[in-house]
Amino acid sequence: MDSLSKRGPDEICTTGEQLQLPILQRCALLRSQKASRITWHSHDCFEILMVLEGSTEYEFEDGRTESLAGGQFLSIAPHVQHRGKHNVRSPARLLGILFDPTVKNAIRNTPFTNKDLRWLTLQIRMGAGYTHRINADIRRYIKALSPSLENIRSANAATLVSFRLAICAILLEVAKQFSSSGVLEPTQVVQSAMDYMKQNLRFDDSIESVAKAANCSRARLFSLFKESTGMTPNDYWLRLRVDHAQLLLRKTNHTVTNIAMESGFSSSQYFSVVFKKYSGSSPRDYREFQKDR
C-alpha cells in the first residue's frame, strides 16, 4: 500500500501500455488491512495517491510528513524521495496513478494538446507534496473508473476509451484544483472536534459532547467532518483510540483489558472487535507480531 512500484496481493492494476495511453505508467486500486514501512524510493514520473477509505501517512526526505484520510489525495513530484510510514490507520482503500507528461507521444489517446500538458504539469508540480481534498468532480470520475479497472482484462474497445477519458479527467481536475485552491486547512469546527477527541481518548464520551465542544450541532459536525476528512467523527475517534491502543501494546506490558479501558473502550470484547477491524489482527496477535520484529 505504501508504494505503487510493486504489485501486492490486494491490488488491481493496469498500465499505460495495456490501455495504449502513453502518458500513464500505471493505475492501481489497492486495498489493505495492514501496512509496513518501506525503504526510501522515488519515481521518474508524477505519483498521485488518493485515499478513498482509511488513512495513511507519508514521510519525505526533508523530514516533513503528510497525513491523508479518506477523501484526500497527495501528489508527489518526480525524483522526490519518500516512504509510507508503518503506522497507517487501516483498513484502507486507495487509488494510485503514476503518469509522465514528458514521454514521447504523451497526448496520444488523450483530449490534451501539448499546451494543455505543459499547463497541467506546472499545476501538479506546484501542488505536489501537500494534502488536498478529493472534490465532487474527481469523486465522480473515480466512481466511473473503478468498475472498469476491476474488469480491465475483459474490457471491450468502448470501455477502454471510457477508461482513458476517466484517467485524463482525473488528471485535469487535479490540476484545476491545484490552480484554484491552497493546502488543505480543516475548518475551525473540525479542528476543535479533533482536538477534543485527542484530549479525551480515555473517556467513553459521546459525539454530542464533541459537538458541544466544537460549538455546533451534531448534524453539522457530521457534515463538516465528512467533507473535511472523508470520515465520520465516530470513525475518526475509533481510529485514534486504536492508534493509542497499538502504542500501549508495543510500549507497555499492560493487559489487553487494561489497554481497552485506557483507550476509551467500554469492554475488552468491543475493543477486540474494533481493533481487528482497523488493524487486521487481534490485540494479542498484534502484540506478538511487534515482539518478533
Image: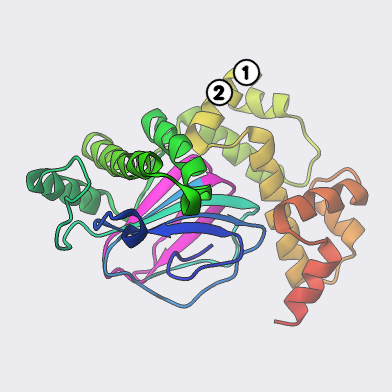
Q: How is the image coloured?
A: rainbow
112, above or below 38, in the image: above
Which quadrant holds the C terminus? bottom right
Q: Residues within 10 Å of mark 1 (few under 14, many from 20)?
A: few
Type of the residue with mark 1: Ala
The image's mark for residue 223 is 2
The residue at 13%/45% (across/down) is: 119
Q: Is residue 121 left or right of residue 266?
A: left
Would residue 169 be visible to someone looking at this image? yes
Q: Is 95 or 181 nearer to us in this picture?
A: 95
Which quadrant holds the N terminus? bottom right
Expressed as whole percent of the image width and height from the top left, the position of residue 93 reads 57, 50
Would residue 217 be visible to someone looking at this image? no
Expressed as whole percent of the image width and height from the top left, the position of residue 11 reads 55, 59
Q: Are marks 1 and 2 in contact (CB under 8 Å)?
A: yes
Type of the residue with mark 2: Ser
274, above or below 77, in the image: above
The residue at 36%/59% (across/down) is: 18
Magenta includes 57? yes
Say which residue label 1 marks. 219
Q: Is 118 or 269 nearer to us in this picture?
A: 118
The residue at 44%/35% (across/down) is: 144
- Residue reaching furthest left? 115
Q: Is 88 or 190 nearer to us in this picture?
A: 88
Could you tell me which secondary element the residue under label 1 belongs to? Answer: helix
29, above or below 82, in the image: above
Could you tell me which secondary element the residue under label 2 belongs to? Answer: helix
Q: Which residues are magenta?
A: 52-81
